[in-house]
Image (cartoon, coloured by chain):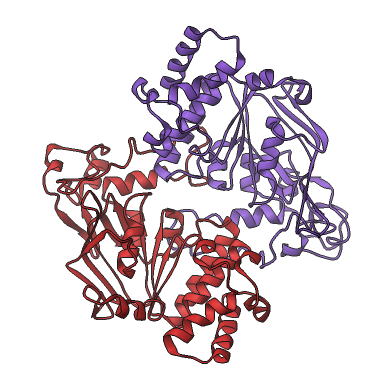
């Protein structure tokens, strides 16, 4: 079966000018990323700001050309498709529904835009599909006549979802779709996305900094750090037995609503990741509480983790002297 | 005597929008009181009203508003600004907008002490460096000479906290101090605040929308909805036995790893937060409430559900127990 999204050796470099006379610096936002997302599943991508998760989303949507590597959507090369064909296959839902909706257009016209851009859908057919889509995402016909400013944040995000789905794409890239919303509204939108995926057989790439949300929606999770996927695994295995020290730190910093537990010490220190200045060897070693001699010297290979995934960490190398007990691997054995 | 006592606080903007409608809360010395609610519920306006930092055109009324026994209602702007930054300090969500980009960290930090205490420049700089080290910033001497844009978001928020501590305040009002930060940095900043509170006996009024933060740092919680405190309780009590239907709905909305199965719908509250016109009567939540009854359109009683546990609802205090039994 062909994967809905397949990414091979993806790399994207930005040149950033520091000052008028300073030479431009290179920022490697995405560095050697490969994965495949089976049709009908949800790949969650997590990581801190600046880890390259939004750049990855833009590369997969074809909004940015990769420096190296390629993106295949539904088995076809993204770079060989024209914009209309791409739009019929893959659509985005972004974080801020206010910034991504034209304030001067009515909701029904915003949702109709992708159909109009295709140029081949008759007006009556387009109007029918817009009405059907609005109803599908829980908006009334009357709300379709309004302007984005007259809607609440949650309703605006419903508009963005309706616009993404009106061409009946196979794949939706959701980049922080609920981060700007209140919790009660976030729950409504997450439930809607889950329902639409089931009913329409969609595949999601779901990007979020909120691990609790990702745990709830994703079937598989990729953890990004400074442009690389440092751990990827089936969602349940990753949350039960995180193999990479960075994943463990991320999970430890999630504050669940359980009183009496206090605020955990994540043990990452004060050094912050800088994508313009990626450390040699393992890129996480300056913040890693378990770093040892080999970490600054040599980039770690992808070692298998329990549950069928992998983690890029020297601690998982069975031959590494002094490596910590590998509970994750033992469980599988 | 409470460190901060707010009773029956009302804030209106231009007579058309009632942002805060009779909110009451108190902060004790050495206590963290979390004010939690969704956007537009009036939690930030409450904080600004306490600090007397409301925008022009806002009207503030209160039955009581006192800090360490001192009535804040009739203080002049001058007297209030003497208190602000000195005995009561505030930190905001986005440190970049509250730090002046044109001045160094050092000059902004020392200004506080020079202005309130008339401290000499050298002593103020010494104190600033000491506090930067206290909030976990390495090489504080170097940081003092830097500008805000040269620091990361987490560092800027640490600088804001250090600056708020310059005059040894008794009360710290923190409005969403970690919302703009990554989760890993958020945990570090919250640990820092907890440590400072323990060491300095600070009273903290923490405003947040995040129930995870509330559970982990608060001693007491007040839940705000549409300008009213609808429920207030000690933290453990609020999470174990919430009484107000809004609090209960809110708690069910939060995805908790391991609690709700994947693909099972999360609880959610239908509808949106209403806009409340002045003169509104009854419960503001009634349009979204699964238990709404005709009585909810009349005056709603404030009821006691246990020691220090109050809620604003027409349902009897033991309704949840009875519902479970039925």
Picture coordinates of residue A23, whole percent (x, y): 83, 57
Query: How far across and how far down the image is residue A51, in percent?
Result: 69, 50
Total numbered labels: 0
Q: Colour of chain A?
A: purple
Return the x and y of residue A177 as percentages of the image width and height.
53, 38
Image height check: is B32 above or below B258? below
Q: Is residue B230 left or right of residue A175?
A: left
Q: Is residue A223 above or below residue A296?
A: above
Q: For the point 34% across and 57% down, which residue is it? A: B43
**B291 or A207, which is in the foreground?**
A207
Where is A50 relative to A150, above or below? below
Residue for point 68% across, 31% down: A61
* Residue located at (15% from left, 42% from top): B296
Considering the image in quadrants, where does the C terminus of chain A appear? top right
Find residue A49 and report its horizontal and vertical position in percent. 63, 52
The colour one sees for chain B in the rendered image is red
Quarter of the rendering occupied by the N terminus of chain A: top right
| Residue A311 shows in this picture | yes
Residue A265 left/right relative to A222: left
- Classify residue B54 by image quadrant: bottom left
Q: Quadrant of residue A250?
A: bottom right
| B101 horizontally vs A330: left or right | left
Can residue A267 be seen here? The reply is no
């Amino acid at each position: 079966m062909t994967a809905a999204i397949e990414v091979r050796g993806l790399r994207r470099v930005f040149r950033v000018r520091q000052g008028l006379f300073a030479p431009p610096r290179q920022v490697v936002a995405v560095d050697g990323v490969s994965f495949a997302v089976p049709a009908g599943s949800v790949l969650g991508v997590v990581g801190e700001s600046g880890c390259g998760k939004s750049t990855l989303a833009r590369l997969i949507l074809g909004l940015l050309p990769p420096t190296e590597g390629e993106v295949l959507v539904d088995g076809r090369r993204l770079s060989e498709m024209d914009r209309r064909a791409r739009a019929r296959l893959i659509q985005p839902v972004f974080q801020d529904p206010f910034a991504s909706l034209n304030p001067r257009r009515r909701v029904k016209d915003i949702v109709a835009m992708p159909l109009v851009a295709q140029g081949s859908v008759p007006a009556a057919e387009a109007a029918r599909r817009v009405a059907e889509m609005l109803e599908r995402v829980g908006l009334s016909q009357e709300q379709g006549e309004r302007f984005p400013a007259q809607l609440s944040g949650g309703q605006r995000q419903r508009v963005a979802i309706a616009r993404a789905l009106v061409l009946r794409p196979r794949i939706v890239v959701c980049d922080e779709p609920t981060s700007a919303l209140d919790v009660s509204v976030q729950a409504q939108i997450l439930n809607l996305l889950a329902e639409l995926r089931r009913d329409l057989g969609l595949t999601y790439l779901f990007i979020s900094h909120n691990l609790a949300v990702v745990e709830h929606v994703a079937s598989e999770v990729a953890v990004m750090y400074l442009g690389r996927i440092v751990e990827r695994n089936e969602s349940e295995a990753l949350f039960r037995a995180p193999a990479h020290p960075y994943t463990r730190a991320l999970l430890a910093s999630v504050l669940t609503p359980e009183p009496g537990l206090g605020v955990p010490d994540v043990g990452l220190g004060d050094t912050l990741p800088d994508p313009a200045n990626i450390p040699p060897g393992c890129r996480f070693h300056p913040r890693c509480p378990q770093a040892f001699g080999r970490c600054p010297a040599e980039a770690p290979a992808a070692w298998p983790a329990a549950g069928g995934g992998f983690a890029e960490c020297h601690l998982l190398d069975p031959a590494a002297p002094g490596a910590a007990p590998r509970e994750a691997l033992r469980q599988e054995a | 005597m409470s460190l901060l006592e707010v009773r029956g606080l009302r804030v209106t903007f231009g007579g058309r929008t009632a942002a805060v409608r009779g909110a009451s809360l108190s902060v004790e010395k050495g206590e963290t009181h979390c004010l939690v609610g969704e956007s537009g519920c009036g939690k930030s306006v409450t904080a600004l009203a306490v600090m007397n930092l409301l925008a022009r055109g806002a009207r503030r009324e209160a039955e009581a508003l006192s800090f360490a026994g001192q009535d804040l209602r009739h203080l002049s702007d001058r007297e209030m600004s003497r208190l602000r930054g000195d005995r009561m300090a505030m930190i905001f969500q986005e440190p970049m907008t509250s730090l002046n980009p044109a001045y160094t960290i050092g000059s902004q930090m020392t200004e506080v002490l020079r202005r309130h205490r008339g401290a000499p420049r050298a002593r103020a700089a010494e104190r600033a460096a000491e506090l930067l080290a206290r909030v976990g910033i390495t090489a504080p001497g170097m940081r003092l000479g830097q500008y805000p844009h040269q620091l990361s978001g987490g560092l800027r928020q640490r600088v804001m906290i250090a600056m708020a501590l310059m005059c040894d305040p008794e009360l710290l009002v923190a409005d969403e101090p970690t919302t703009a930060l990554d989760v890993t940095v958020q945990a570090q900043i919250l640990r820092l605040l907890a440590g400072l509170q323990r060491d300095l006996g600070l009273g903290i009024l923490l405003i947040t929308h995040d129930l995870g933060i509330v559970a982990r740092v608060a001693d007491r919680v007040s839940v705000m909805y549409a300008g009213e405190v609808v429920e207030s309780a000690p933290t453990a009590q609020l999470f174990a036995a919430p009484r107000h239907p809004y609090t209960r709905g809110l708690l069910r909305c939060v995805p908790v790893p391991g609690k709700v199965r994947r693909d099972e719908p999360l609880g959610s509250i239908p509808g949106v937060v209403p806009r409340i016109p002045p003169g509104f009567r009854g419960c503001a939540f009634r349009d979204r409430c699964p238990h709404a009854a005709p009585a909810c359109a009349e005056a709603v009683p404030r009821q006691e559900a246990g020691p220090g546990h109050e809620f604003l609802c027409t349902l009897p205090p033991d309704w949840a127990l009875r519902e479970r039994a039925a």
